[in-house]
Image: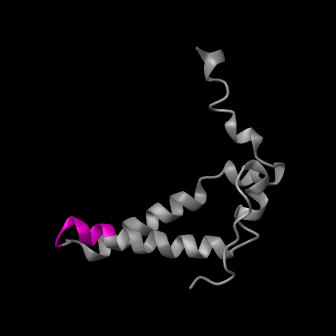
């Protein structure tokens, strides 16, 4: 069973060496989860489930925009393109 499952946990090893250090850390995700928790705790009581979804979704959208323009810190579409069969897709320098 372990031999059959070998490709699954080692799949990340196919990324370029420059990306491996970024893949080993969950700090950005943990920080984002903590920020969502902090912001929802400030509100306290939400009127309905959609309100929670809108707040968390807005925060995730904002964080995605920030990560998209921080070229030096995160993996970019251009550097991950060799791993895909799809053509390179580029993001605008500034989120609209």
Q: How is the image coloured?
A: one colour
**Residue 17, position in %: x, y?**
83, 48
**Residue reaching furthest left?**
47
Q: Nearer the viewer, residue 15 or 38?
A: 15
Q: Nearer the viewer, residue 39 or 68?
A: 68
Q: Nearer the viewer, residue 23 or 94?
A: 94
**Which image quadrant is residue 93 in?**
bottom right
Q: Nearer the viewer, residue 49 or 35?
A: 49
Q: Is residue 76 visible?
A: no
Residue depicted at x 76% and y 41%: 14
Instruction: Magenta stretch: give its range.
Output: 47-53
Q: Magenta part mainly helix, strand or loop? A: helix
Q: Is residue 60 left or right of residue 72?
A: left
**Which image quadrant is residue 58 in?**
bottom left
Q: Is residue 63 visible?
A: yes
**Residue 80, position in %: x, y?**
74, 56
**Residue 6, position in %: x, y?**
66, 24
Where 2 sits versus 71, above or below?
Answer: above
Q: Is residue 41 left or right of residue 69?
A: left
Residue depicted at x 74% and y 63%: 88
Q: Is residue 49 magenta?
A: yes
Residue depicted at x 50% and y 76%: 62
Position of the N terminus, as image quadrant, is: top right
**Residue reaching furthest right?**
17
Residue depicted at x 57% and y 75%: 65
Q: Is residue 53 left or right of residue 27?
A: left
Q: Is residue 66 magenta?
A: no
**Which image quadrant is residue 40 in?**
bottom left
Position of the C terminus, as image quadrant, is: bottom right
Where 7 sits versus 83, above or below?
Answer: above
How many numbered circles does the render carry? Answer: 0
């Amino acid at each position: 069973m372990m031999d059959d499952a070998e490709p699954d946990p080692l799949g990340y090893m196919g990324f370029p060496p420059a990306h491996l250090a970024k893949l080993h850390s969950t700090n950005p995700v943990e920080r984002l989860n903590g920020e969502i928790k902090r912001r929802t705790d400030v509100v306290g009581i939400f009127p309905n489930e959609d309100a929670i979804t809108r707040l968390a979704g807005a925060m995730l959208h904002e964080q995605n925009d920030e990560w998209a323009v921080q070229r030096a810190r995160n993996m970019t579409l251009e550097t991950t393109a060799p791993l895909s069969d799809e053509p390179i897709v580029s993001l605008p320098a500034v989120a609209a």
